[in-house]
Image: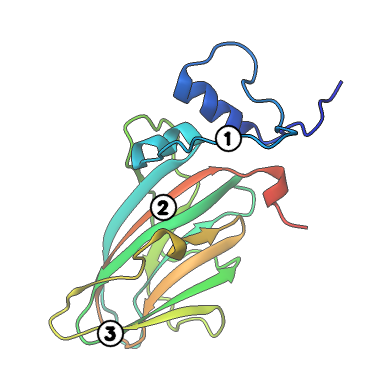
Amino acid sequence: MARYNEILSGRFNRALTKVFSIKGSAPAPQLSTEIMPVLPLPRWVDDEFLYGWDQFGFGLAVGAVAASNSSAWLTNPPNSGVIALITDVHWNVANATVNHFINANPGTLSAGFTGNPLDGRTVRKSAIQGSSGQPGALPATGLIGSFAGGAGGLEFYAIQRESQYIPLPPGFGFQTGVVAQNLAYTISFRWKERPIEDSEKGA
């Protein structure tokens, strides 16, 4: 028999079980029906694993090709079964603007890469597909940011706080690309991912 206000999102119960080393059935199977005091628990980077998040990263250099825009993508395949959050994007390119795009079904570029786990407890591989190369031209749609680079090729960080994390649901891709052609640049990504909940799969 179902309980009143039964919690159907199992990852929060699993987190409670791991944080407090609780044995047996779910420690918090239902929501409170009365006003109750709440003691917030601090969440640090190393706690993300307990909440079902796996963290990955990758850095690469994208070469220059005449009449082409150097670009790098992170793609979440339609049937990946994970939701991803891009937590860090930073790059180095002198005197050039770098644009960011989000588009559905963006495909991949010629050179592929797989994220490396940032937490030694992570045992699975990242579901996110990375690629880099020269697509010829940047997308005409999906622009979410444009960043003008300064002289000397100083590193530019697009994400400064949690509110700027970029969600990447299944079937979507995040692309960065240098607006000027025939320019090389180096770029690093960090992201975290976890199994997607049924309630997060859209209408």
Query: Does the rendering let one see residue 62?
Result: no
- Horizontal and vertical percent position of residue 175: 45, 70
Label 2 and label 1: CA atoms lie apart by 34 Å
Tell me which numbered mark, 3 or 2, is placed earlier along the sequence: 3
Q: Which residue is mark 1?
A: 37
Determine which of the numbered discs, if any, sits on residue 182 in the image. Answer: 3
Q: Which residue is mark 2?
A: 191
Report the side of 25 relative to 175 (left or right): right
Residue projecting furthest to the left: 152
Label 3 and label 2: CA atoms lie apart by 28 Å
Label 1 and label 3: CA atoms lie apart by 60 Å
- Horizontal and vertical percent position of residue 106: 55, 68
Instruction: Pick whichever, 20 or 78, lies toward us.
Output: 20
> Within the image, what quadrant is residue 1 found in?
top right
Quadrant the C terminus occupies? bottom right
Residue kind at label 2, given as amino acid type: Trp
Residue projecting furthest to the top: 24
Q: Nearer the viewer, mark 1 or mark 3?
A: 1
Residue kind at label 1, given as amino acid type: Pro
Q: Nearer the viewer, mark 3 or mark 2?
A: 2
> Within the image, what quadrant is residue 94 found in?
bottom left
Residue kind at label 3, given as amino acid type: Asn
- Horizontal and vertical percent position of residue 22: 52, 15
Tell me which numbered mark, 2 or 1, is placed earlier along the sequence: 1
**Mark 2 Cα-neighbour bin, 10 Å: few <14, some 14–19, many ≥20:** many
Residue at 75% x, 33% y: name it: 33
Determine which of the numbered discs, if any, sits on residue 89 in the image. Answer: none
Under tag 3, what secondary structure?
A: loop
Instruction: Pick whichever, 26 or 185, lies toward us.
Output: 26
Q: Are discs 1 and 3 less than 8 Å apart at CB?
A: no
- Horizontal and vertical percent position of residue 200: 67, 50
Instruction: Pick whichever, 179 or 110, lies toward us.
Output: 179
